[in-house]
Amino acid sequence: MSQDNAKAIYQAHLDTVSQALWDLDMPTLLRLLLLPATIGTRNGHIQLTTEGQMREMILSTRKSLEALGATAYLRHAEHAAFSNAERTELRGRHISYALSGGSFAMTPFSSWQTLVLQDGAWCSTGIEADLEERHLRLLVPGLLRAPNTAQPQSCAAQARPAPAPKT
C-alpha cells in the first residue's frame, strides 16, 4: 500500500485489528498494538506496559462485545493525516460499530488513534474512545487512573468534542 494515503493506511489498520479482535487473533493484535499503550474513555485512562495487561484488555473488550450480543465489530475511518515530516506517524479519527444482525448492539462511538510505522507495519500506540465504560469495557479496572478530564496523552489528533450532558 502506498504511504501517500494516510486514510487508506488508517482504514487498513482498523480493518485488520477489528477482525483480529473478533477472531481473538492474539499474535496479530500483539504485533499491531504497541506497548506501552494508553487506552482512554470518558471514565479514565489505563497505561498498558506488559503483554499480560494487553491480553487482559483485549479479552475484556471481546467479552464485552459478546455480552452486548454483537455479531460483528466494524470501524470506519473518518479522517487521518500524517503527523510528521518523515510520514512514519499518522493520527486519525474513526467511528466504531458493534452490530447484532442488521442492528446496532450499542450506539456507535468516535475514537482517536495514533499509528506509527515500525518494522514495516503500522502499529497503534493507544486509543481514546468517546464512550462510557458501561457500554463497552476497554479499561482494565486494576489499571484505571483518574477520570478523564485532560486531553488524551498519546492518541488525540484533534480536540475531542465535549461529551453530551447527562440527563
Image (cartoon, rainbow, N blue to C red):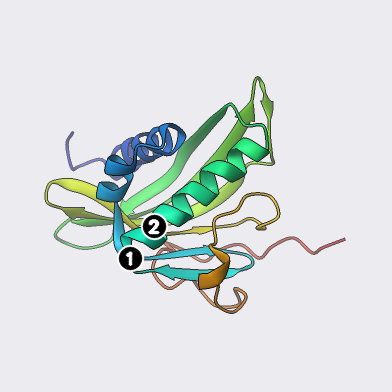
How many numbered callouts?
Answer: 2
Provide residue 64's location: percent of width, then percent of height. Answer: 61, 45
Q: Which mark is residue 54?
A: 2
Relative depth, front residue between 149 and 55: 55
The furthest residue to the top: 102
Image quadrant holding the C terminus, namely bottom right
Q: Which mark is residue 93?
A: none
Q: Secondary structure at mark 1?
A: loop
Provide residue 125's location: percent of width, then percent of height. Answer: 33, 60
Corner quadrant of residue 95: top right
Against 138, residue 101 (above or below) is above
Q: Secondary structure at mark 2?
A: helix
Provide residue 63's location: percent of width, then percent of height. Answer: 57, 43
Provide residue 147's location: percent of width, then percent of height. Answer: 62, 75
Corner quadrant of residue 162: bottom right
Against 25, residue 139 (above or below) is below
Image quadrant holding the N terminus, namely top left
Against 103, residue 124 (above or below) is below
Q: What's the residue type where badge 2 is placed? A: Met
Decide if residue 108 is on the left or right side of residue 19. Answer: right
Q: Residue at x 37, y 49 (%)?
A: 80
Q: Which mark is residue 50?
A: 1
Q: Residue at x 59, y 40 (%)?
A: 65
